[in-house]
Image (cartoon, rainbow, N blue to C red):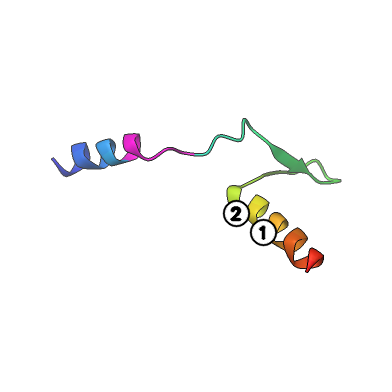
Amino acid sequence: MAKENQQEADQKQPKPNFNGAAIIDENGKETLITEEMIRDACDSIEDAKA
């Protein structure tokens, strides 16, 4: 039953979909762009305006 409850919780919680957005470094290594990365960047811009 616990597994069923976890599956229901997973389905109810929307997961961000960045459609495979990534940063590719000079060596070709891909780093997926996360919501946290975007929030940090936006916060940095807001702080720079202040």
Q: Nearer the viewer, residue 18 or 29?
A: 18
How far apart are labels 1 and 2 at the CA level?
6 Å
Residue at image position (67%, 59%) is: 40
Q: Nearer the viewer, residue 13 or 21?
A: 13
Estimate the x, y position of residue 5 in percent, counting from the top left: 20, 41
Estimate the x, y position of residue 33 in percent, counting from the top left: 66, 45
For the residue labelled by badge 2, is the local secondary structure a helix, a strand or a loop?
helix
Residue 40 disc label: 1
Reading the image, the residue beneath label 2 is: 36
Q: Nearer the viewer, residue 44 or 33?
A: 44
Residue at image position (55%, 34%) is: 17
Magenta highlight range = 10-15
Q: Amino acid at mark 2?
A: Glu
**In the image, residue 42 above or below residue 4:** below
Residue farthest along the front direction in this orientation? 50
**Numbered label tally:** 2
Residue at image position (25%, 42%) is: 6
Q: Judge whether residue 44 is colored magenta.
A: no
